[in-house]
Amino acid sequence: MGTWKIAVLALGANLGDRQKTIETAIEQLAAQKKIRVLERSPLVESVALTESGEDKSLPSYLNGVIKIATQLRPKKLLEVITRIENLHGRIRLHRWGSRTLDIDIITYEDVFKSSKHLTIPHPQTHHRPFVLVPWTLMDEEAILPGHGRISDLSSSMTSQVSVLK
């Protein structure tokens, strides 16, 4: 049996029953033999982000962050995540499109990895209030490898999302 590694995942959706989809996806992750959900953030709502910036004409996103322990290596974890996204009707027509579910590996221990299908830490995290704000609410002491404390990174971003109660 492999050793348990800590990873942070971001979940988001802007189509369908967003909250139910995210809740179900977290349950599906927790049901995996080699994944344990350790912590979860509150959900936040934000304007849809496209390649050219915010687009208020699109449905808004719900986003949250979870901390997991996993015995899966990053590539296998990505396979599980992709399978769960597909179960929720995720269609990859274009990179910045609306989606029923998006799950990203934000960090995996202190691993730095870059391949065609996976970059860890997630390369845009330090610019994304919809990841940093809920992550800070979950664990204000967390560090984004290569960028520092997430609470420092998110301090000017809190007005860009609404925290769900």
Image (cartoon, rainbow, N blue to C red):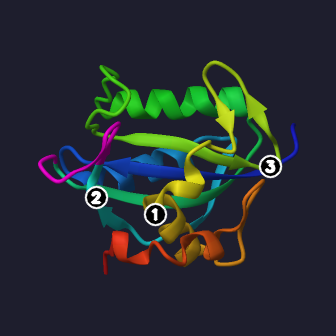
The answer to whether residue 4 is magenta is no
Residue type (three-letter) at the residue carrying disc 1? Pro
Q: How many labels sit on residues?
A: 3
C-alpha distance separating marks 3 and 2? 27 Å
Task: Tell me the CA gap for discs 3 and 1.
Answer: 25 Å
Determine whether, in the image, residue 62 is placed left or right of residue 40. Answer: left
Q: Which residue is mark 3?
A: 5
Secondary element under disc 3, as helix, strand or loop, is strand
In primary-sequence order, the first of circles 3 and 2 is: 3
Count neighbours of disc 1 (C-alpha within 10 A) and say few if under 14, some if 14 to 19, many if 20 or more: many
Residue 92 percent location from the top left of the image: 34, 22
Q: Earlier in the sequence, mark 3 or mark 1?
A: 3
Q: Do we see residue 82 in this rendering?
A: yes
Rendered image quadrant of residue 62: bottom left
Q: Is residue 5 shown above or below 45?
A: above
What's the residue at 57%, 74% (across, down)? 136
Mark 1 = which residue?
129
Report the front residue among 34 and 78.
78
* The magenta segment: 49-58
Disc nearest the viewer among 3 and 1: 1
> Would you call the spot at circle 3 few (<14 residues within 10 Å), some (14-19), or many (20 or more)?
some
Residue at 16% across / 50% down in the picture?
A: 59
* Residue 31 in view: no
Q: Give the amino acid type for the residue marked by disc 3 in the picture.
A: Lys
Which residue type does callout 2 highlight?
Gln
